């Protein structure tokens, strides 16, 4: 059975910033889909334990005051999120996240920060991570398309609805629908076994990062582009 017609779990976080080593989770969503239909959804609002920068609040709409008043303890929330994702992965359900390197690394660092057993350790190492990343898939399938590849722009390119952008639930659902659209559009992707697809994305992610780094260097910008995927080693 193709992963396109099976069960998927979609994951997204909104955070205090964009640095995976220091960002704290503010909101998170885990959505379960079966044959492309949403069957269950879970949401978390966390008190990240630090002030939420105004720039981040403008993106996701959560203020420091609201997070402190209504947010759950990050220890409890990170344990719940990690446990739920691990349960799905152990059942060989594909985990969809757009730009998974960010969301899964942030979750990993939050787990280690709060003494929670990390996801990768719960599923038997990297071989147990069955991740489907629409960003990596799109860059591979349509590598010469110009322009930025944000979730909104990639969804628009493939005609996938993105409602409630920059809310964890809206972004997670859009990522799942985008992954399904990519799998249906490109037989190379949709016809692949989940484990094989995961392994191939590791290689594609490294190639894409190296290509972008060369692009920067050619233009006098000696920037390092992270190639590790789906979790940056700590």
Image (tube, helix red, strand yellow):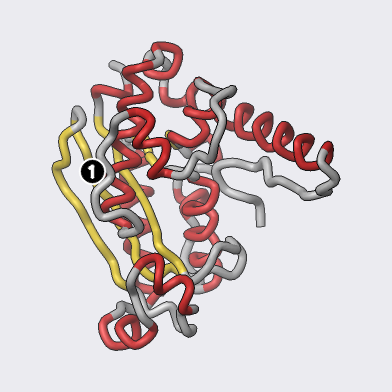
Look at the image and tell me whether residue 92 can be seen.
Answer: no
Q: Position of residue 200 (x, y in %)?
A: 56, 24
Relative to 85, is 92 above or below?
Answer: above
What's the residue at 48%, 28% (across, down)?
137
Relative to 208, is 108 above or below?
Answer: below
Q: Position of residue 140 (x, y in %)?
A: 55, 24
What's the residue at 50%, 42% (across, down)?
124
Residue 62 figure quarter: bottom left
Closer-to-camera residue (83/70) = 70
Relative to 130, is 12 above or below?
Answer: below
Look at the image and tell me whether residue 137 can be seen.
Answer: yes
In what quadrant of the picture does the N terminus appear? top left
Q: Position of residue 100 (x, y in %)?
A: 48, 45
Relative to 81, is 174 above or below?
Answer: above
What's the residue at 53%, 35% (across, down)?
127
Horizontal placement of 38 versus 92: left or right?
A: left
Count the numbered circles shown.
1
In what quadrant of the picture does the C terminus appear? bottom right
Q: Position of residue 44 (x, y in %)?
A: 28, 66
What's the residue at 41%, 44% (across, down)?
151
Q: Which residue is mark 1?
A: 32
Closer-to-camera residue (29/165) = 165
Q: Secondary structure at mark 1?
A: strand
């Amino acid at each position: 059975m193709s992963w396109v017609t099976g069960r998927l779990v979609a994951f997204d976080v909104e955070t205090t910033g964009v640095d995976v080593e220091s960002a704290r989770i503010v909101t998170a969503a885990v959505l379960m889909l079966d044959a492309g239909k949403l069957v269950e959804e879970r949401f978390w609002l966390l008190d990240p334990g630090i002030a939420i920068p105004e720039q981040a609040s403008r993106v996701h709409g959560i203020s420091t005051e609201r997070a402190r008043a209504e947010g759950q303890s990050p220890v409890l929330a990170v344990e719940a999120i990690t446990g739920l994702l691990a349960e799905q992965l152990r059942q060989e359900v594909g985990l969809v996240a757009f730009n998974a390197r960010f969301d899964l690394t942030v979750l990993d660092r939050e787990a280690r920060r709060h003494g929670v057993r990390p996801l990768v350790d719960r599923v038997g190492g990297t071989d147990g991570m069955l991740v489907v990343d629409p960003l990596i898939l799109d860059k591979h399938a349509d590598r010469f398309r110009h322009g930025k590849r944000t979730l909104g722009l990639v969804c628009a390119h493939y005609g996938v609805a993105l409602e409630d952008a920059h809310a964890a639930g809206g972004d997670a659902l859009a990522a799942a629908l985008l992954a399904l659209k990519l799998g249906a559009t490109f037989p190379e992707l949709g016809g692949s076994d989940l484990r094989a697809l995961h392994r191939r994305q590791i290689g594609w992610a490294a190639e894409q990062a190296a290509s972008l780094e060369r692009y920067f260097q050619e233009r006098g910008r000696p920037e390092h582009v992270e190639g590790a995927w789906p979790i940056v080693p700590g």
